[in-house]
Image (spheres, grey):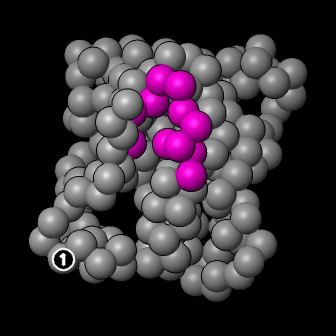
Amino acid sequence: MITMFKIVRGDITKFRAEAIVNAANKYLEHGGGVAYAIAKAASGDVSEYTRISKEEMRRQLGKDWIEHGEVVVTPPMKLKENGVKYVIHTVGPYCGGVWSKDKEEKLKLAILGALKKADELGVKSIAFPAISAGIYGCPLKEVVRTFKEVVKEFLKVANHVKEVYLVLYSERDYKLALETIGLGDNDESR
């Protein structure tokens, strides 16, 4: 099976993948950053998508919050137009600009939880934002390194997932991510 990890520049709300990952807060309140953008694109009404997300969290997990490594799956609603079948919500660590081994482990759990759920759902392609690198303040270089490490190991054992994308919105972040993993202008890693 050919598997692929690719860093791309774009808008995750318009990206064509069977699943997209939302970098959520632990209460699935989609008030800012990529969480807001995904909720807005999915429903048009962020409050409504937040309500749906919270209902699904209670139904799937039996509680009102998610921990690192746990995920909640919600319907794609309008994102279905892009071929999205699932939105997978996961929570990464809050860094506030400070990186540590603990933050790295929490990020690994968040990424791996989403990958495992996608594989369980039979998803072939999944797109991630740079979890925790936005409003949670984790250094992008560390997020990218961690992401590549987790994805590389996961793809060795995945049953269904064949394509994993890290979707970065800004040109600056995109170039920094490529530089971080030593790809320069080549955006593909197998």
Residue at image position (15%, 66%) is 186
- The local crowd at label 1, few if under 14, some if 14 to 19, many if 20 or more residues have their Cα within 10 Å, is few
The residue positioned 39% from the left and 25% from the top of the image is: 124
- Give the extent of the magenta segment: 153-164
Q: Would residue 144 appear left or right of 10 to someone viewing this image?
A: right
Which residue is label 1 attached to? 184
Q: Is residue 43 visible?
A: no
User: Outermost residue, bottom direction?
Assistant: 98
What's under tag 1, amino acid-wise? Gly
Q: Position of residue 79 (x, y in %)?
A: 32, 22
Q: Is residue 135 above or below residue 79?
A: below
**Residue 141 image offset from top left, x and y in percent:** 44, 78
Q: What residue is shown at x 46% (from left), y 61% (from top)?
A: 148
**Left or right relative to 6: residue 128:** right
136 vs 161: above or below: below
Assess whether residue 155 is covered by the magenta stretch.
yes
127 left or right, relative to 147: left
Q: Looking at this view, is 168 or 147 the one in front? A: 147
* Residue 59 in view, yes or no: yes
